[in-house]
Every structure is written in C-alpha cells, then in structure tokens.
Amino acid sequence: MAETGTAAHFSDEFQERKNVSGKIFEQNQLIFAHKKLPFSTEIKVVNLKTTVARLPK
C-alpha cells in the first residue's frame, strides 16, 4: 500500500508532553501518525523530493 501526505510541525507547546500513544513528545525527533493505521504499525516514509527514507520507531 502506498499513500502520499503532508508533514506538519508542532510548536514548543507540546515539548516533553505525552502524546496520544503515551510517549513523550520530543520536538527534534520524527513522529508519524495516520488516521487509519493502528499504533505500532511498521511503515516506511520516503521524502519524494530527496528520496530519503525513514523507518520511524
């Protein structure tokens, strides 16, 4: 399955707060969310402009 989407940046307001999955939000780390995929689903994210791929944890 392949999808395209957009990225968002969250302000300092969320720094070191728990997110919906219970993990502490760190602004300098990459966090991914999806409306339909459940938590802990393994995904690969690719920047289509640079072709750099990330495997979020």
Image: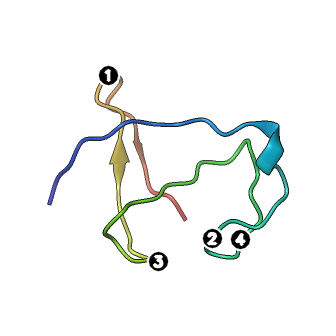
Residue hosting label 3 = 40
Q: Name the residue: 74% across, 44% down.
A: 27
Tag shown at residue 23:
4
Q: Name the residue: 32% across, 22% down.
A: 49
Q: Residue furthest top?
A: 49
Q: Earlier in the sequence, mark 4 or mark 1?
A: 4
Q: Within 10 Å of the Cα at label 4, are there few (<14), some (14-19), or many (20+) other Cα atoms? A: few
Image-based side of 45 in relation to 7, left or right: left
Q: Residue furthest right?
A: 16
What kind of element bears circle 3?
A: loop
Number of the front mark, 1 or 3: 3
Front in this rendered view, residue 39 or 46: 39
What kind of element bears circle 4?
A: loop
Q: Earlier in the sequence, mark 3 or mark 2?
A: 2
Image-based side of 53 in relation to 31, left or right: left
Q: Earlier in the sequence, mark 4 or mark 3?
A: 4
Q: Earlier in the sequence, mark 1 or mark 3?
A: 3
Residue hosting label 1 = 49
Q: Earlier in the sequence, mark 1 or mark 2?
A: 2
Q: Compute the Cα span from label 1 to label 2.
A: 30 Å
**Residue 34's spot in the image, x, y percent?**
39, 60
Q: Compute the Cα span from label 4 to label 3.
A: 12 Å
Residue hosting label 2 = 20
Q: Compute the Cα span from label 1 to label 3.
A: 26 Å
Colour scheme? rainbow
Q: Amino acid at mark 2?
A: Val
Residue 20, image quadrant: bottom right
Q: Amino acid at mark 4?
A: Lys
Q: Amino acid at mark 1?
A: Lys
